[in-house]
Image (cartoon, rainbow, N blue to C red):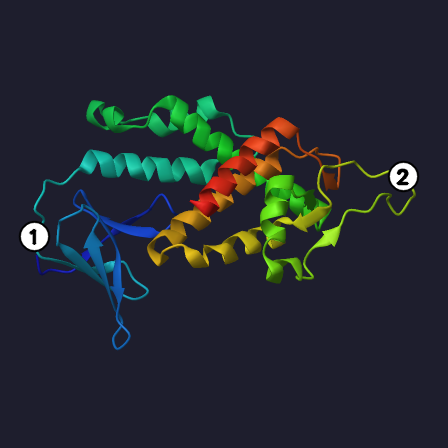
Amino acid sequence: MNEEITFDTVKSERGFDNLVYDGHRYRNYRNSTSTDRIVWRCCVRGCNAKAQTTKGTMKGLVLGQHNHEPDSAQRTVEKRMNELKESVNSKSNAKDLIRISKSGLTGTELAKYPQENAVRSLIWRKKRRLVACTNENEQGRQRFVVPDELKQMLEADQALSASTSFSSVEGTTAAGNEAPQSNSSLTMTRCEFQTEMVNRLGAIPVERRGEMRARIERELDILFSQKVAEEVEQVFDETSRGAVMERLLAMITD
């Protein structure tokens, strides 16, 4: 196919732009440093078909032939899921969002639509992330207690132990009231914690680091959603905190 066409776009699971045309989806493959061309490759493993666009536009060409059939129904569902994610806010009703998202889909498209429980979970996670961001903005430098398991791992790293980004939990507040008691004497901001976790990705193969960063972000969303809303010093239920940190530790050290 040699005539110029206009591509549609959808977001990948990791939030990257993908091109869509005629039932096929393409991911970014190569950006030219000497021209204004961007090359995209079919998302189906083993297919060598490519697309080419001009930087700053969605116009371009399809290069080569696909070795598989197009899946227009799947592309439609992906577009609807993108729109659903964009429409979620802190007051969203999952049932209404799903109903609107499914509206007008054909039987074939509905068959490819994710299970309702999975979509509800996606909406819940997005709402939780929005609430966490709102609370963090309102309360400024949010701090949380670092669980014992993670503290031991961090303290084993001498360079990290010397870091000035750590601060001790004070026994009393500025007003003289007792601060919440904790099993840990370390506190960190979310930003500091995430930075330290990402720094530990140095031992992980390069091709897995993007996945690890995304997983760290998801676990932090869970961790921060469990804070006591009225407390600047975040306190977590021991059982839920342990479960979250167990997953985080396994993720970082596997």
Horizontal side, residue 20 vs residue 98: left or right: left
**Side (left or right) of 190 relative to 228:** left
Q: What residue is shown with label 1? A: 65
**Residue furthest toward the right?**
176
Report which residue position mark 2 lands on: 177
The residue shown at (73%, 45%) is 185
Can residue 89 be seen in this snapshot? no
**Image point (50%, 55%), residue name:** 200
| Rendering quarter of residue 118 | top left
Q: Residues within 10 Å of mark 2 (few under 14, many from 20)?
A: few
What amino acid type is highlighted by mark number 2? Asn
User: In which quadrant will I find the C terminus?
Assistant: top left
In percent of width and height, residue 51 lies at 18, 58
Crowdedness of circle 1 by 10 Å Cα count: few (<14), some, many (20+)? few
> Which image quarter: residue 103?
top left
Quarter-of-image position of residue 164: bottom right
- Asked whether residue 17 appears in the rendered view, the answer is yes
Q: Nearer the viewer, mark 2 or mark 1?
A: 2
In the structure shown, which secondary structural element does the residue marked by tag 2 occupy? Answer: loop
> Helix, strand or loop at disc 1?
loop
Quadrant containing the N terminus is bottom left
At horizontal 43% and vertical 38% (from top left) the residue drawn is 85
Residue 25 place in picture, x, y as percent:
22, 47
Q: Residue furthest bottom?
A: 34
Residue 105 percent coordinates (x, y): 27, 27
Depth check: give the residue in front, 128 or 62. 128
Q: Which circle marks residue 125 in the picture?
A: none
Q: Are marks 2 and 1 in contact (CB under 8 Å)?
A: no
Q: Calculate the distance from the C-alpha at mark 2 to the C-alpha at mark 1.
A: 71 Å
> Which is more toward the observer, 63 or 227?
227
